[in-house]
Image (cartoon, rainbow, N blue to C red):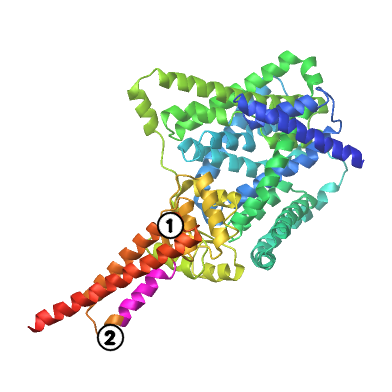
Amino acid sequence: MEHNLLFNAMVYLAAAVLVVPLAKRLALGAVLGYLLAGILIGPYGFRLIGEVEDALHFAEFGVVLLLFLIGLELEPSKLWSLRRPIFGWGGAQVLGVAAALCGAAILAGIDWKVALIAGLGLSLSSTAIALASLEERNLMPTPAGQAGFSILLFQDIAAIPMIAIVPLLGVPEEAGGGGNAWQAVLKVVVVLAGLIVAGRFLVRPLLRVIAKTDTREIFTAFALLMVIAISLLMQWIGVSMALGAFMAGVLLADSEYRHALESDVEPFKGLLLGLFFIAVGMSVDFAVFLAQPLLILGLVAAFQVIKIAILYALSRILGMARGQHLQFALLLSQGGEFAFVVFGAAATARVFSSDVASILVVVVALSMVVTPLTLMLYDRIQAWRQGGAGGRKASKKKADAIEPNEDHVIIAGFGRFGQIVGRFLHANDVRLTVLDHDPDQIEVLRHFGFKVFYGDATRADLLRAAGAAKARAVVVAIDDIDDSLALVDTVKRDYPDLPIFARARNVTHYYQLMDLGVTMIERETYESALKLGRTVMTEGLGQSAYRTRNAANRFRRHNKQSLEAVYPYYKDRETFVSLSKQAREELEEMIARDRRAAEEEKTHYWD
């Protein structure tokens, strides 16, 4: 068994590594690549994998992690502010598509129960495919992207009651079993209430304790443990694992550990979600397709035409930009991951036969394959039309875009230096995202309304999760010099246009930052020491403020010139020491000239 497990893992990874890059190179997208990889290694390809059902059940955890990450993005306050697009637009989409498909099926002579479950299942879209397509085309900030995200979120929520009502329409397995219905409902309510309390008063303190160990793998292990435990708990009470994962994400969305959790879970989500799509490709029953190819192709075409028509009409009602109606409809036109769960539950409850379930699964899988192709065709048609339409049309298209919905400054390190920068910016209404790795410090700052997140800012995945791509600037205020340089190197590599404002601990650190191309640098004690020197001269020695200010300006100017002059030689120790001595001698000469000038001015005044 161990041999089979390792062999299967090797086959999955090899298929993904070989097929997905090729699919992306051909502009087919990663999702389609995973689906094709699954088809190739599955029962109707090279038959390298036999246990398709086991793989699909295991890979469903990728969808669970996806919903956990979606929940992390939605603070309760943000979720409440989006209630209208989520429940209004999302409800209209699901009900509209389900009613149209159900009505069409009933007119075709299909039993109303089969038509209802099929319509509800097919009304769901693929969260993974749609979100990936939105990100690839940079559409998330646009009205189409925002509406699509809201509708996908509602679909993820709506899948839960869909799965719950399937047994009510099926054939009862035992008489008299309905007496436990109220107990089941009570169990769900109690568990959900317990999750809310535990998320607020148990999980966060535990995260704080684990964060203090400063052991990243234990933090990652706890994140996975939490998601798995909550998912299994929800499954135990008869509710979808996805609901538990989504709720866990929402409960932790306003936590200071949100970005750290997101960056730790993201790699597992991506890998398992890829495995999920491979398993979907493997599960496509080509025997069913070859037995009735015209029927299945007709169902795919009818399903997508009806769904695209409803989505197109909805986009016009929502008042989207004129050029985004069809694009929005195509993005959500495919079947979704939860359709497999709904149809599986329907077959188990005997709402319809396993043959009908197999046909619908093939229809959904083929719609997933078709969607990336139709989007690619749409993009090429749009590019061709814009290329031949002249400047006026191109300018119209450009005007449809909106500004990104994030406009913030990232502060990495919120110690004694970063605090002052952060407080000043915060007081002047600058939106901040603060990254720090001290749990006690974070907890104190949260009480004062600062948005502080736990995590190692030098990690590229954490920077991406914190919104570095949409930030206006990053302030590097980390205490450790090596970490500071590592962060600058990461930002320069991944976000070359992002302005960097850095804190230098000493002159060598200053030069190292210059080596990396940073030009906006402040030495942490320099200005405060110079200001104290001015105070000593004015308050302690009674000299004029005007004279001390001029002296400080001269000192600052000379010091900067000296730093820049010595910089090319700072790695050559002998030359560096020689030039530093020369700079000190020049400073002494300047001070002597200042004294002589002051004495002459004083003598001239008394004369």
Q: Residue furthest top?
A: 294
User: Residue 244 versus residue 383: which sits nearer the camera?
Assistant: 383
Cα distance, mark 2 to mark 1? Answer: 35 Å
Mark 2 — residue? 541
Q: In the image, what residue occupies the spot 59% across and 28% down?
A: 333
Secondary element at tag 2: loop
Q: Residue furthest right?
A: 1
Q: Main secondary structure of the magenta part?
A: helix
Residue 39 quadrant: top right
Residue 87 quadrant: top right
Secondary element at tag 1: helix
Image quadrant containing the C terminus: bottom left
Q: Are marks 2 and 1 in contact (CB under 8 Å)?
A: no
In this rendering, position of residue 536 left or right of residue 435: left
Q: State which region is magenta.
A: 524-536
Q: Residue furthest left?
A: 607
Image quadrant containing the N terminus: top right
**Label 1 crowd (10 A; few <14 / some 14-19 / many >=20):** many
Mark 1 — residue? 567
Q: Can see residue 357?
A: no
Would residue 133 be counted in the magenta stretch? no
In this rendering, position of residue 71 left or right of residue 61: left
